[in-house]
Image: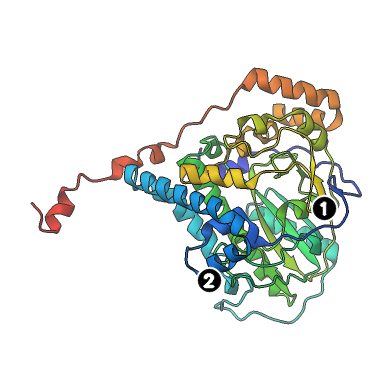
Amino acid sequence: MWGVRERYRQKYASPPPEVDSPTYDIVGQVERYDQRDHPNARNSMVPGSMEFEDYYRRHPELKEWDDESRRRLAKHKEKWRTEDPIGAQIGPAAFYGRRVLGLPDIVEGKVSAREKVDSARVDADPREMARLIKSYAGYLGAGRVRITRLNQDWVYTHYASPYTLEPYGKPVELDYKNIICMAFPQNLKMMANGDGIAEDLEVGWMYAYSSLASVIIAHFIRSMGWRTKALPPENSPFLIVPTFVDAGIGEQGRTSHVITKEFGNNFRPGAVATDMPLALDKPVDFGMQDFCEKCKICADECPSGAIPKGGKEVVRGVRMWHFDGENCRRYWDSIGGSCGICQYVCPWNFPGNWYHNAVREMNQRSALMRRLAIVGHHLVYGKFRRGALPEWIARSKDAMGNGDIGSESAGVK
């Protein structure tokens, strides 16, 4: 079963224990992040455009690297389109949903609806309202939903058009009290494709899926008179990882993803910022820092070498495992699409059956068990092996005609 129904066959483990402080370490002054510096934002810029000229005037040392990345991406996308012109568009079509749902008017709720939205403020019990929102988001497909205060240290300084659909260089003003964090599990069978068509489709689809849920939840809260903004992946001007850690979605792992107890790092995020009073959640600690310190499976399997094999470093005032986004992006450009190998091989990403849930519970409680679980993973599962494509994707080339009809219609014999 490859479709959306597969996501609802899981039996999740018990919730991880809450703690008073998140499991990352603040070291000195936290430095806010400028989205214009993101490798994906730089990669998206069009040579000769205003943002292109502005950025490399300020950062000439990055231009040669970025030009080479753009050249590689264009080359491999063209190769992919030539070899499989139908399959090459399967993933990008899903990413289009992410793009549209990130439009400023949509995230701000300025798109007119058929029904008149009642702007009268509805006062509700914060605890009951939080429970209702979590249930609503769960119905829409979120596997885990938590709420926290929006920490301004995690808010970007500036937007990065065309990577985000806001004006280039616009200062970010995300002055809301709370943020609702939602994790949408990905289909593990699709992610087993590693860095191929099925994985690219799953990533794009889950971005679109989480975007839609974010927009719906934001509209729901906004209709009750509370200032609210949807934060879908195409328009999320904040650092998702520390925010989701603050909320207790999970802990930050070696890949610099958030790892949940229930489905590992195999998810895509959605979020909503709001001033509505809501009961807040605490961070969690289920032994992930110790586990990732011992494990290193993701680092060994990463084809780009972007995941560190050593210890933590201080990055912009936070001690963490420092993921090399530059090398990760360069690998994506070299294959003409996305890669999700690290979102498949993590030992916490197994399906939620009784056996793997039992291992999760023991890993949470015992440092010795974590070590044994890692050894067992190597013995039983070994190195990463790319999974099969769904039959309908594998046969995408069969949908191509032989060209006769097109030639005749053009008057060519």
- In primary-sequence order, the first of circles 1 and 2 is 2
Asked whether 283 or 119 is in front, the reply is 283
Viewer can see residue 325: yes
Residue at the left extreme, as displayed: 413
Residue that appears at 73% across and 43% down:
322
Question: Residue 54, how many percent across, how many down?
Answer: 58, 68
Image position of 361 with respect to 152: above or below: above
Residue that appears at 73% across and 38% down:
254
Left or right placement of residue 120 versus residue 79 in this view: right
Residue at image mark 1:
317
Residue at image mark 2:
50
- Indicate the amino acid at tag 1: Gly
- Disc 1 to disc 2, C-alpha distance: 31 Å
Residue that appears at 82% across and 74% down:
123
Label at residue 87: none
Question: Residue 93, how many percent across, how many down?
Answer: 44, 55
Count all numbered tags in the image, as a single digit.
2
Of tags 1 and 2, the one toward the viewer is: 2
- Indicate the amino acid at tag 2: Met
Image position of 154 with respect to 348: above or below: below
Viewer can see residue 232: no
Left or right placement of residue 26 versus residue 348 in this view: right
Q: Could you say whether the residue bearing mark 2 is in a helix, strand or loop? A: helix
Question: Residue 340, how many percent across, how many down?
Answer: 57, 41
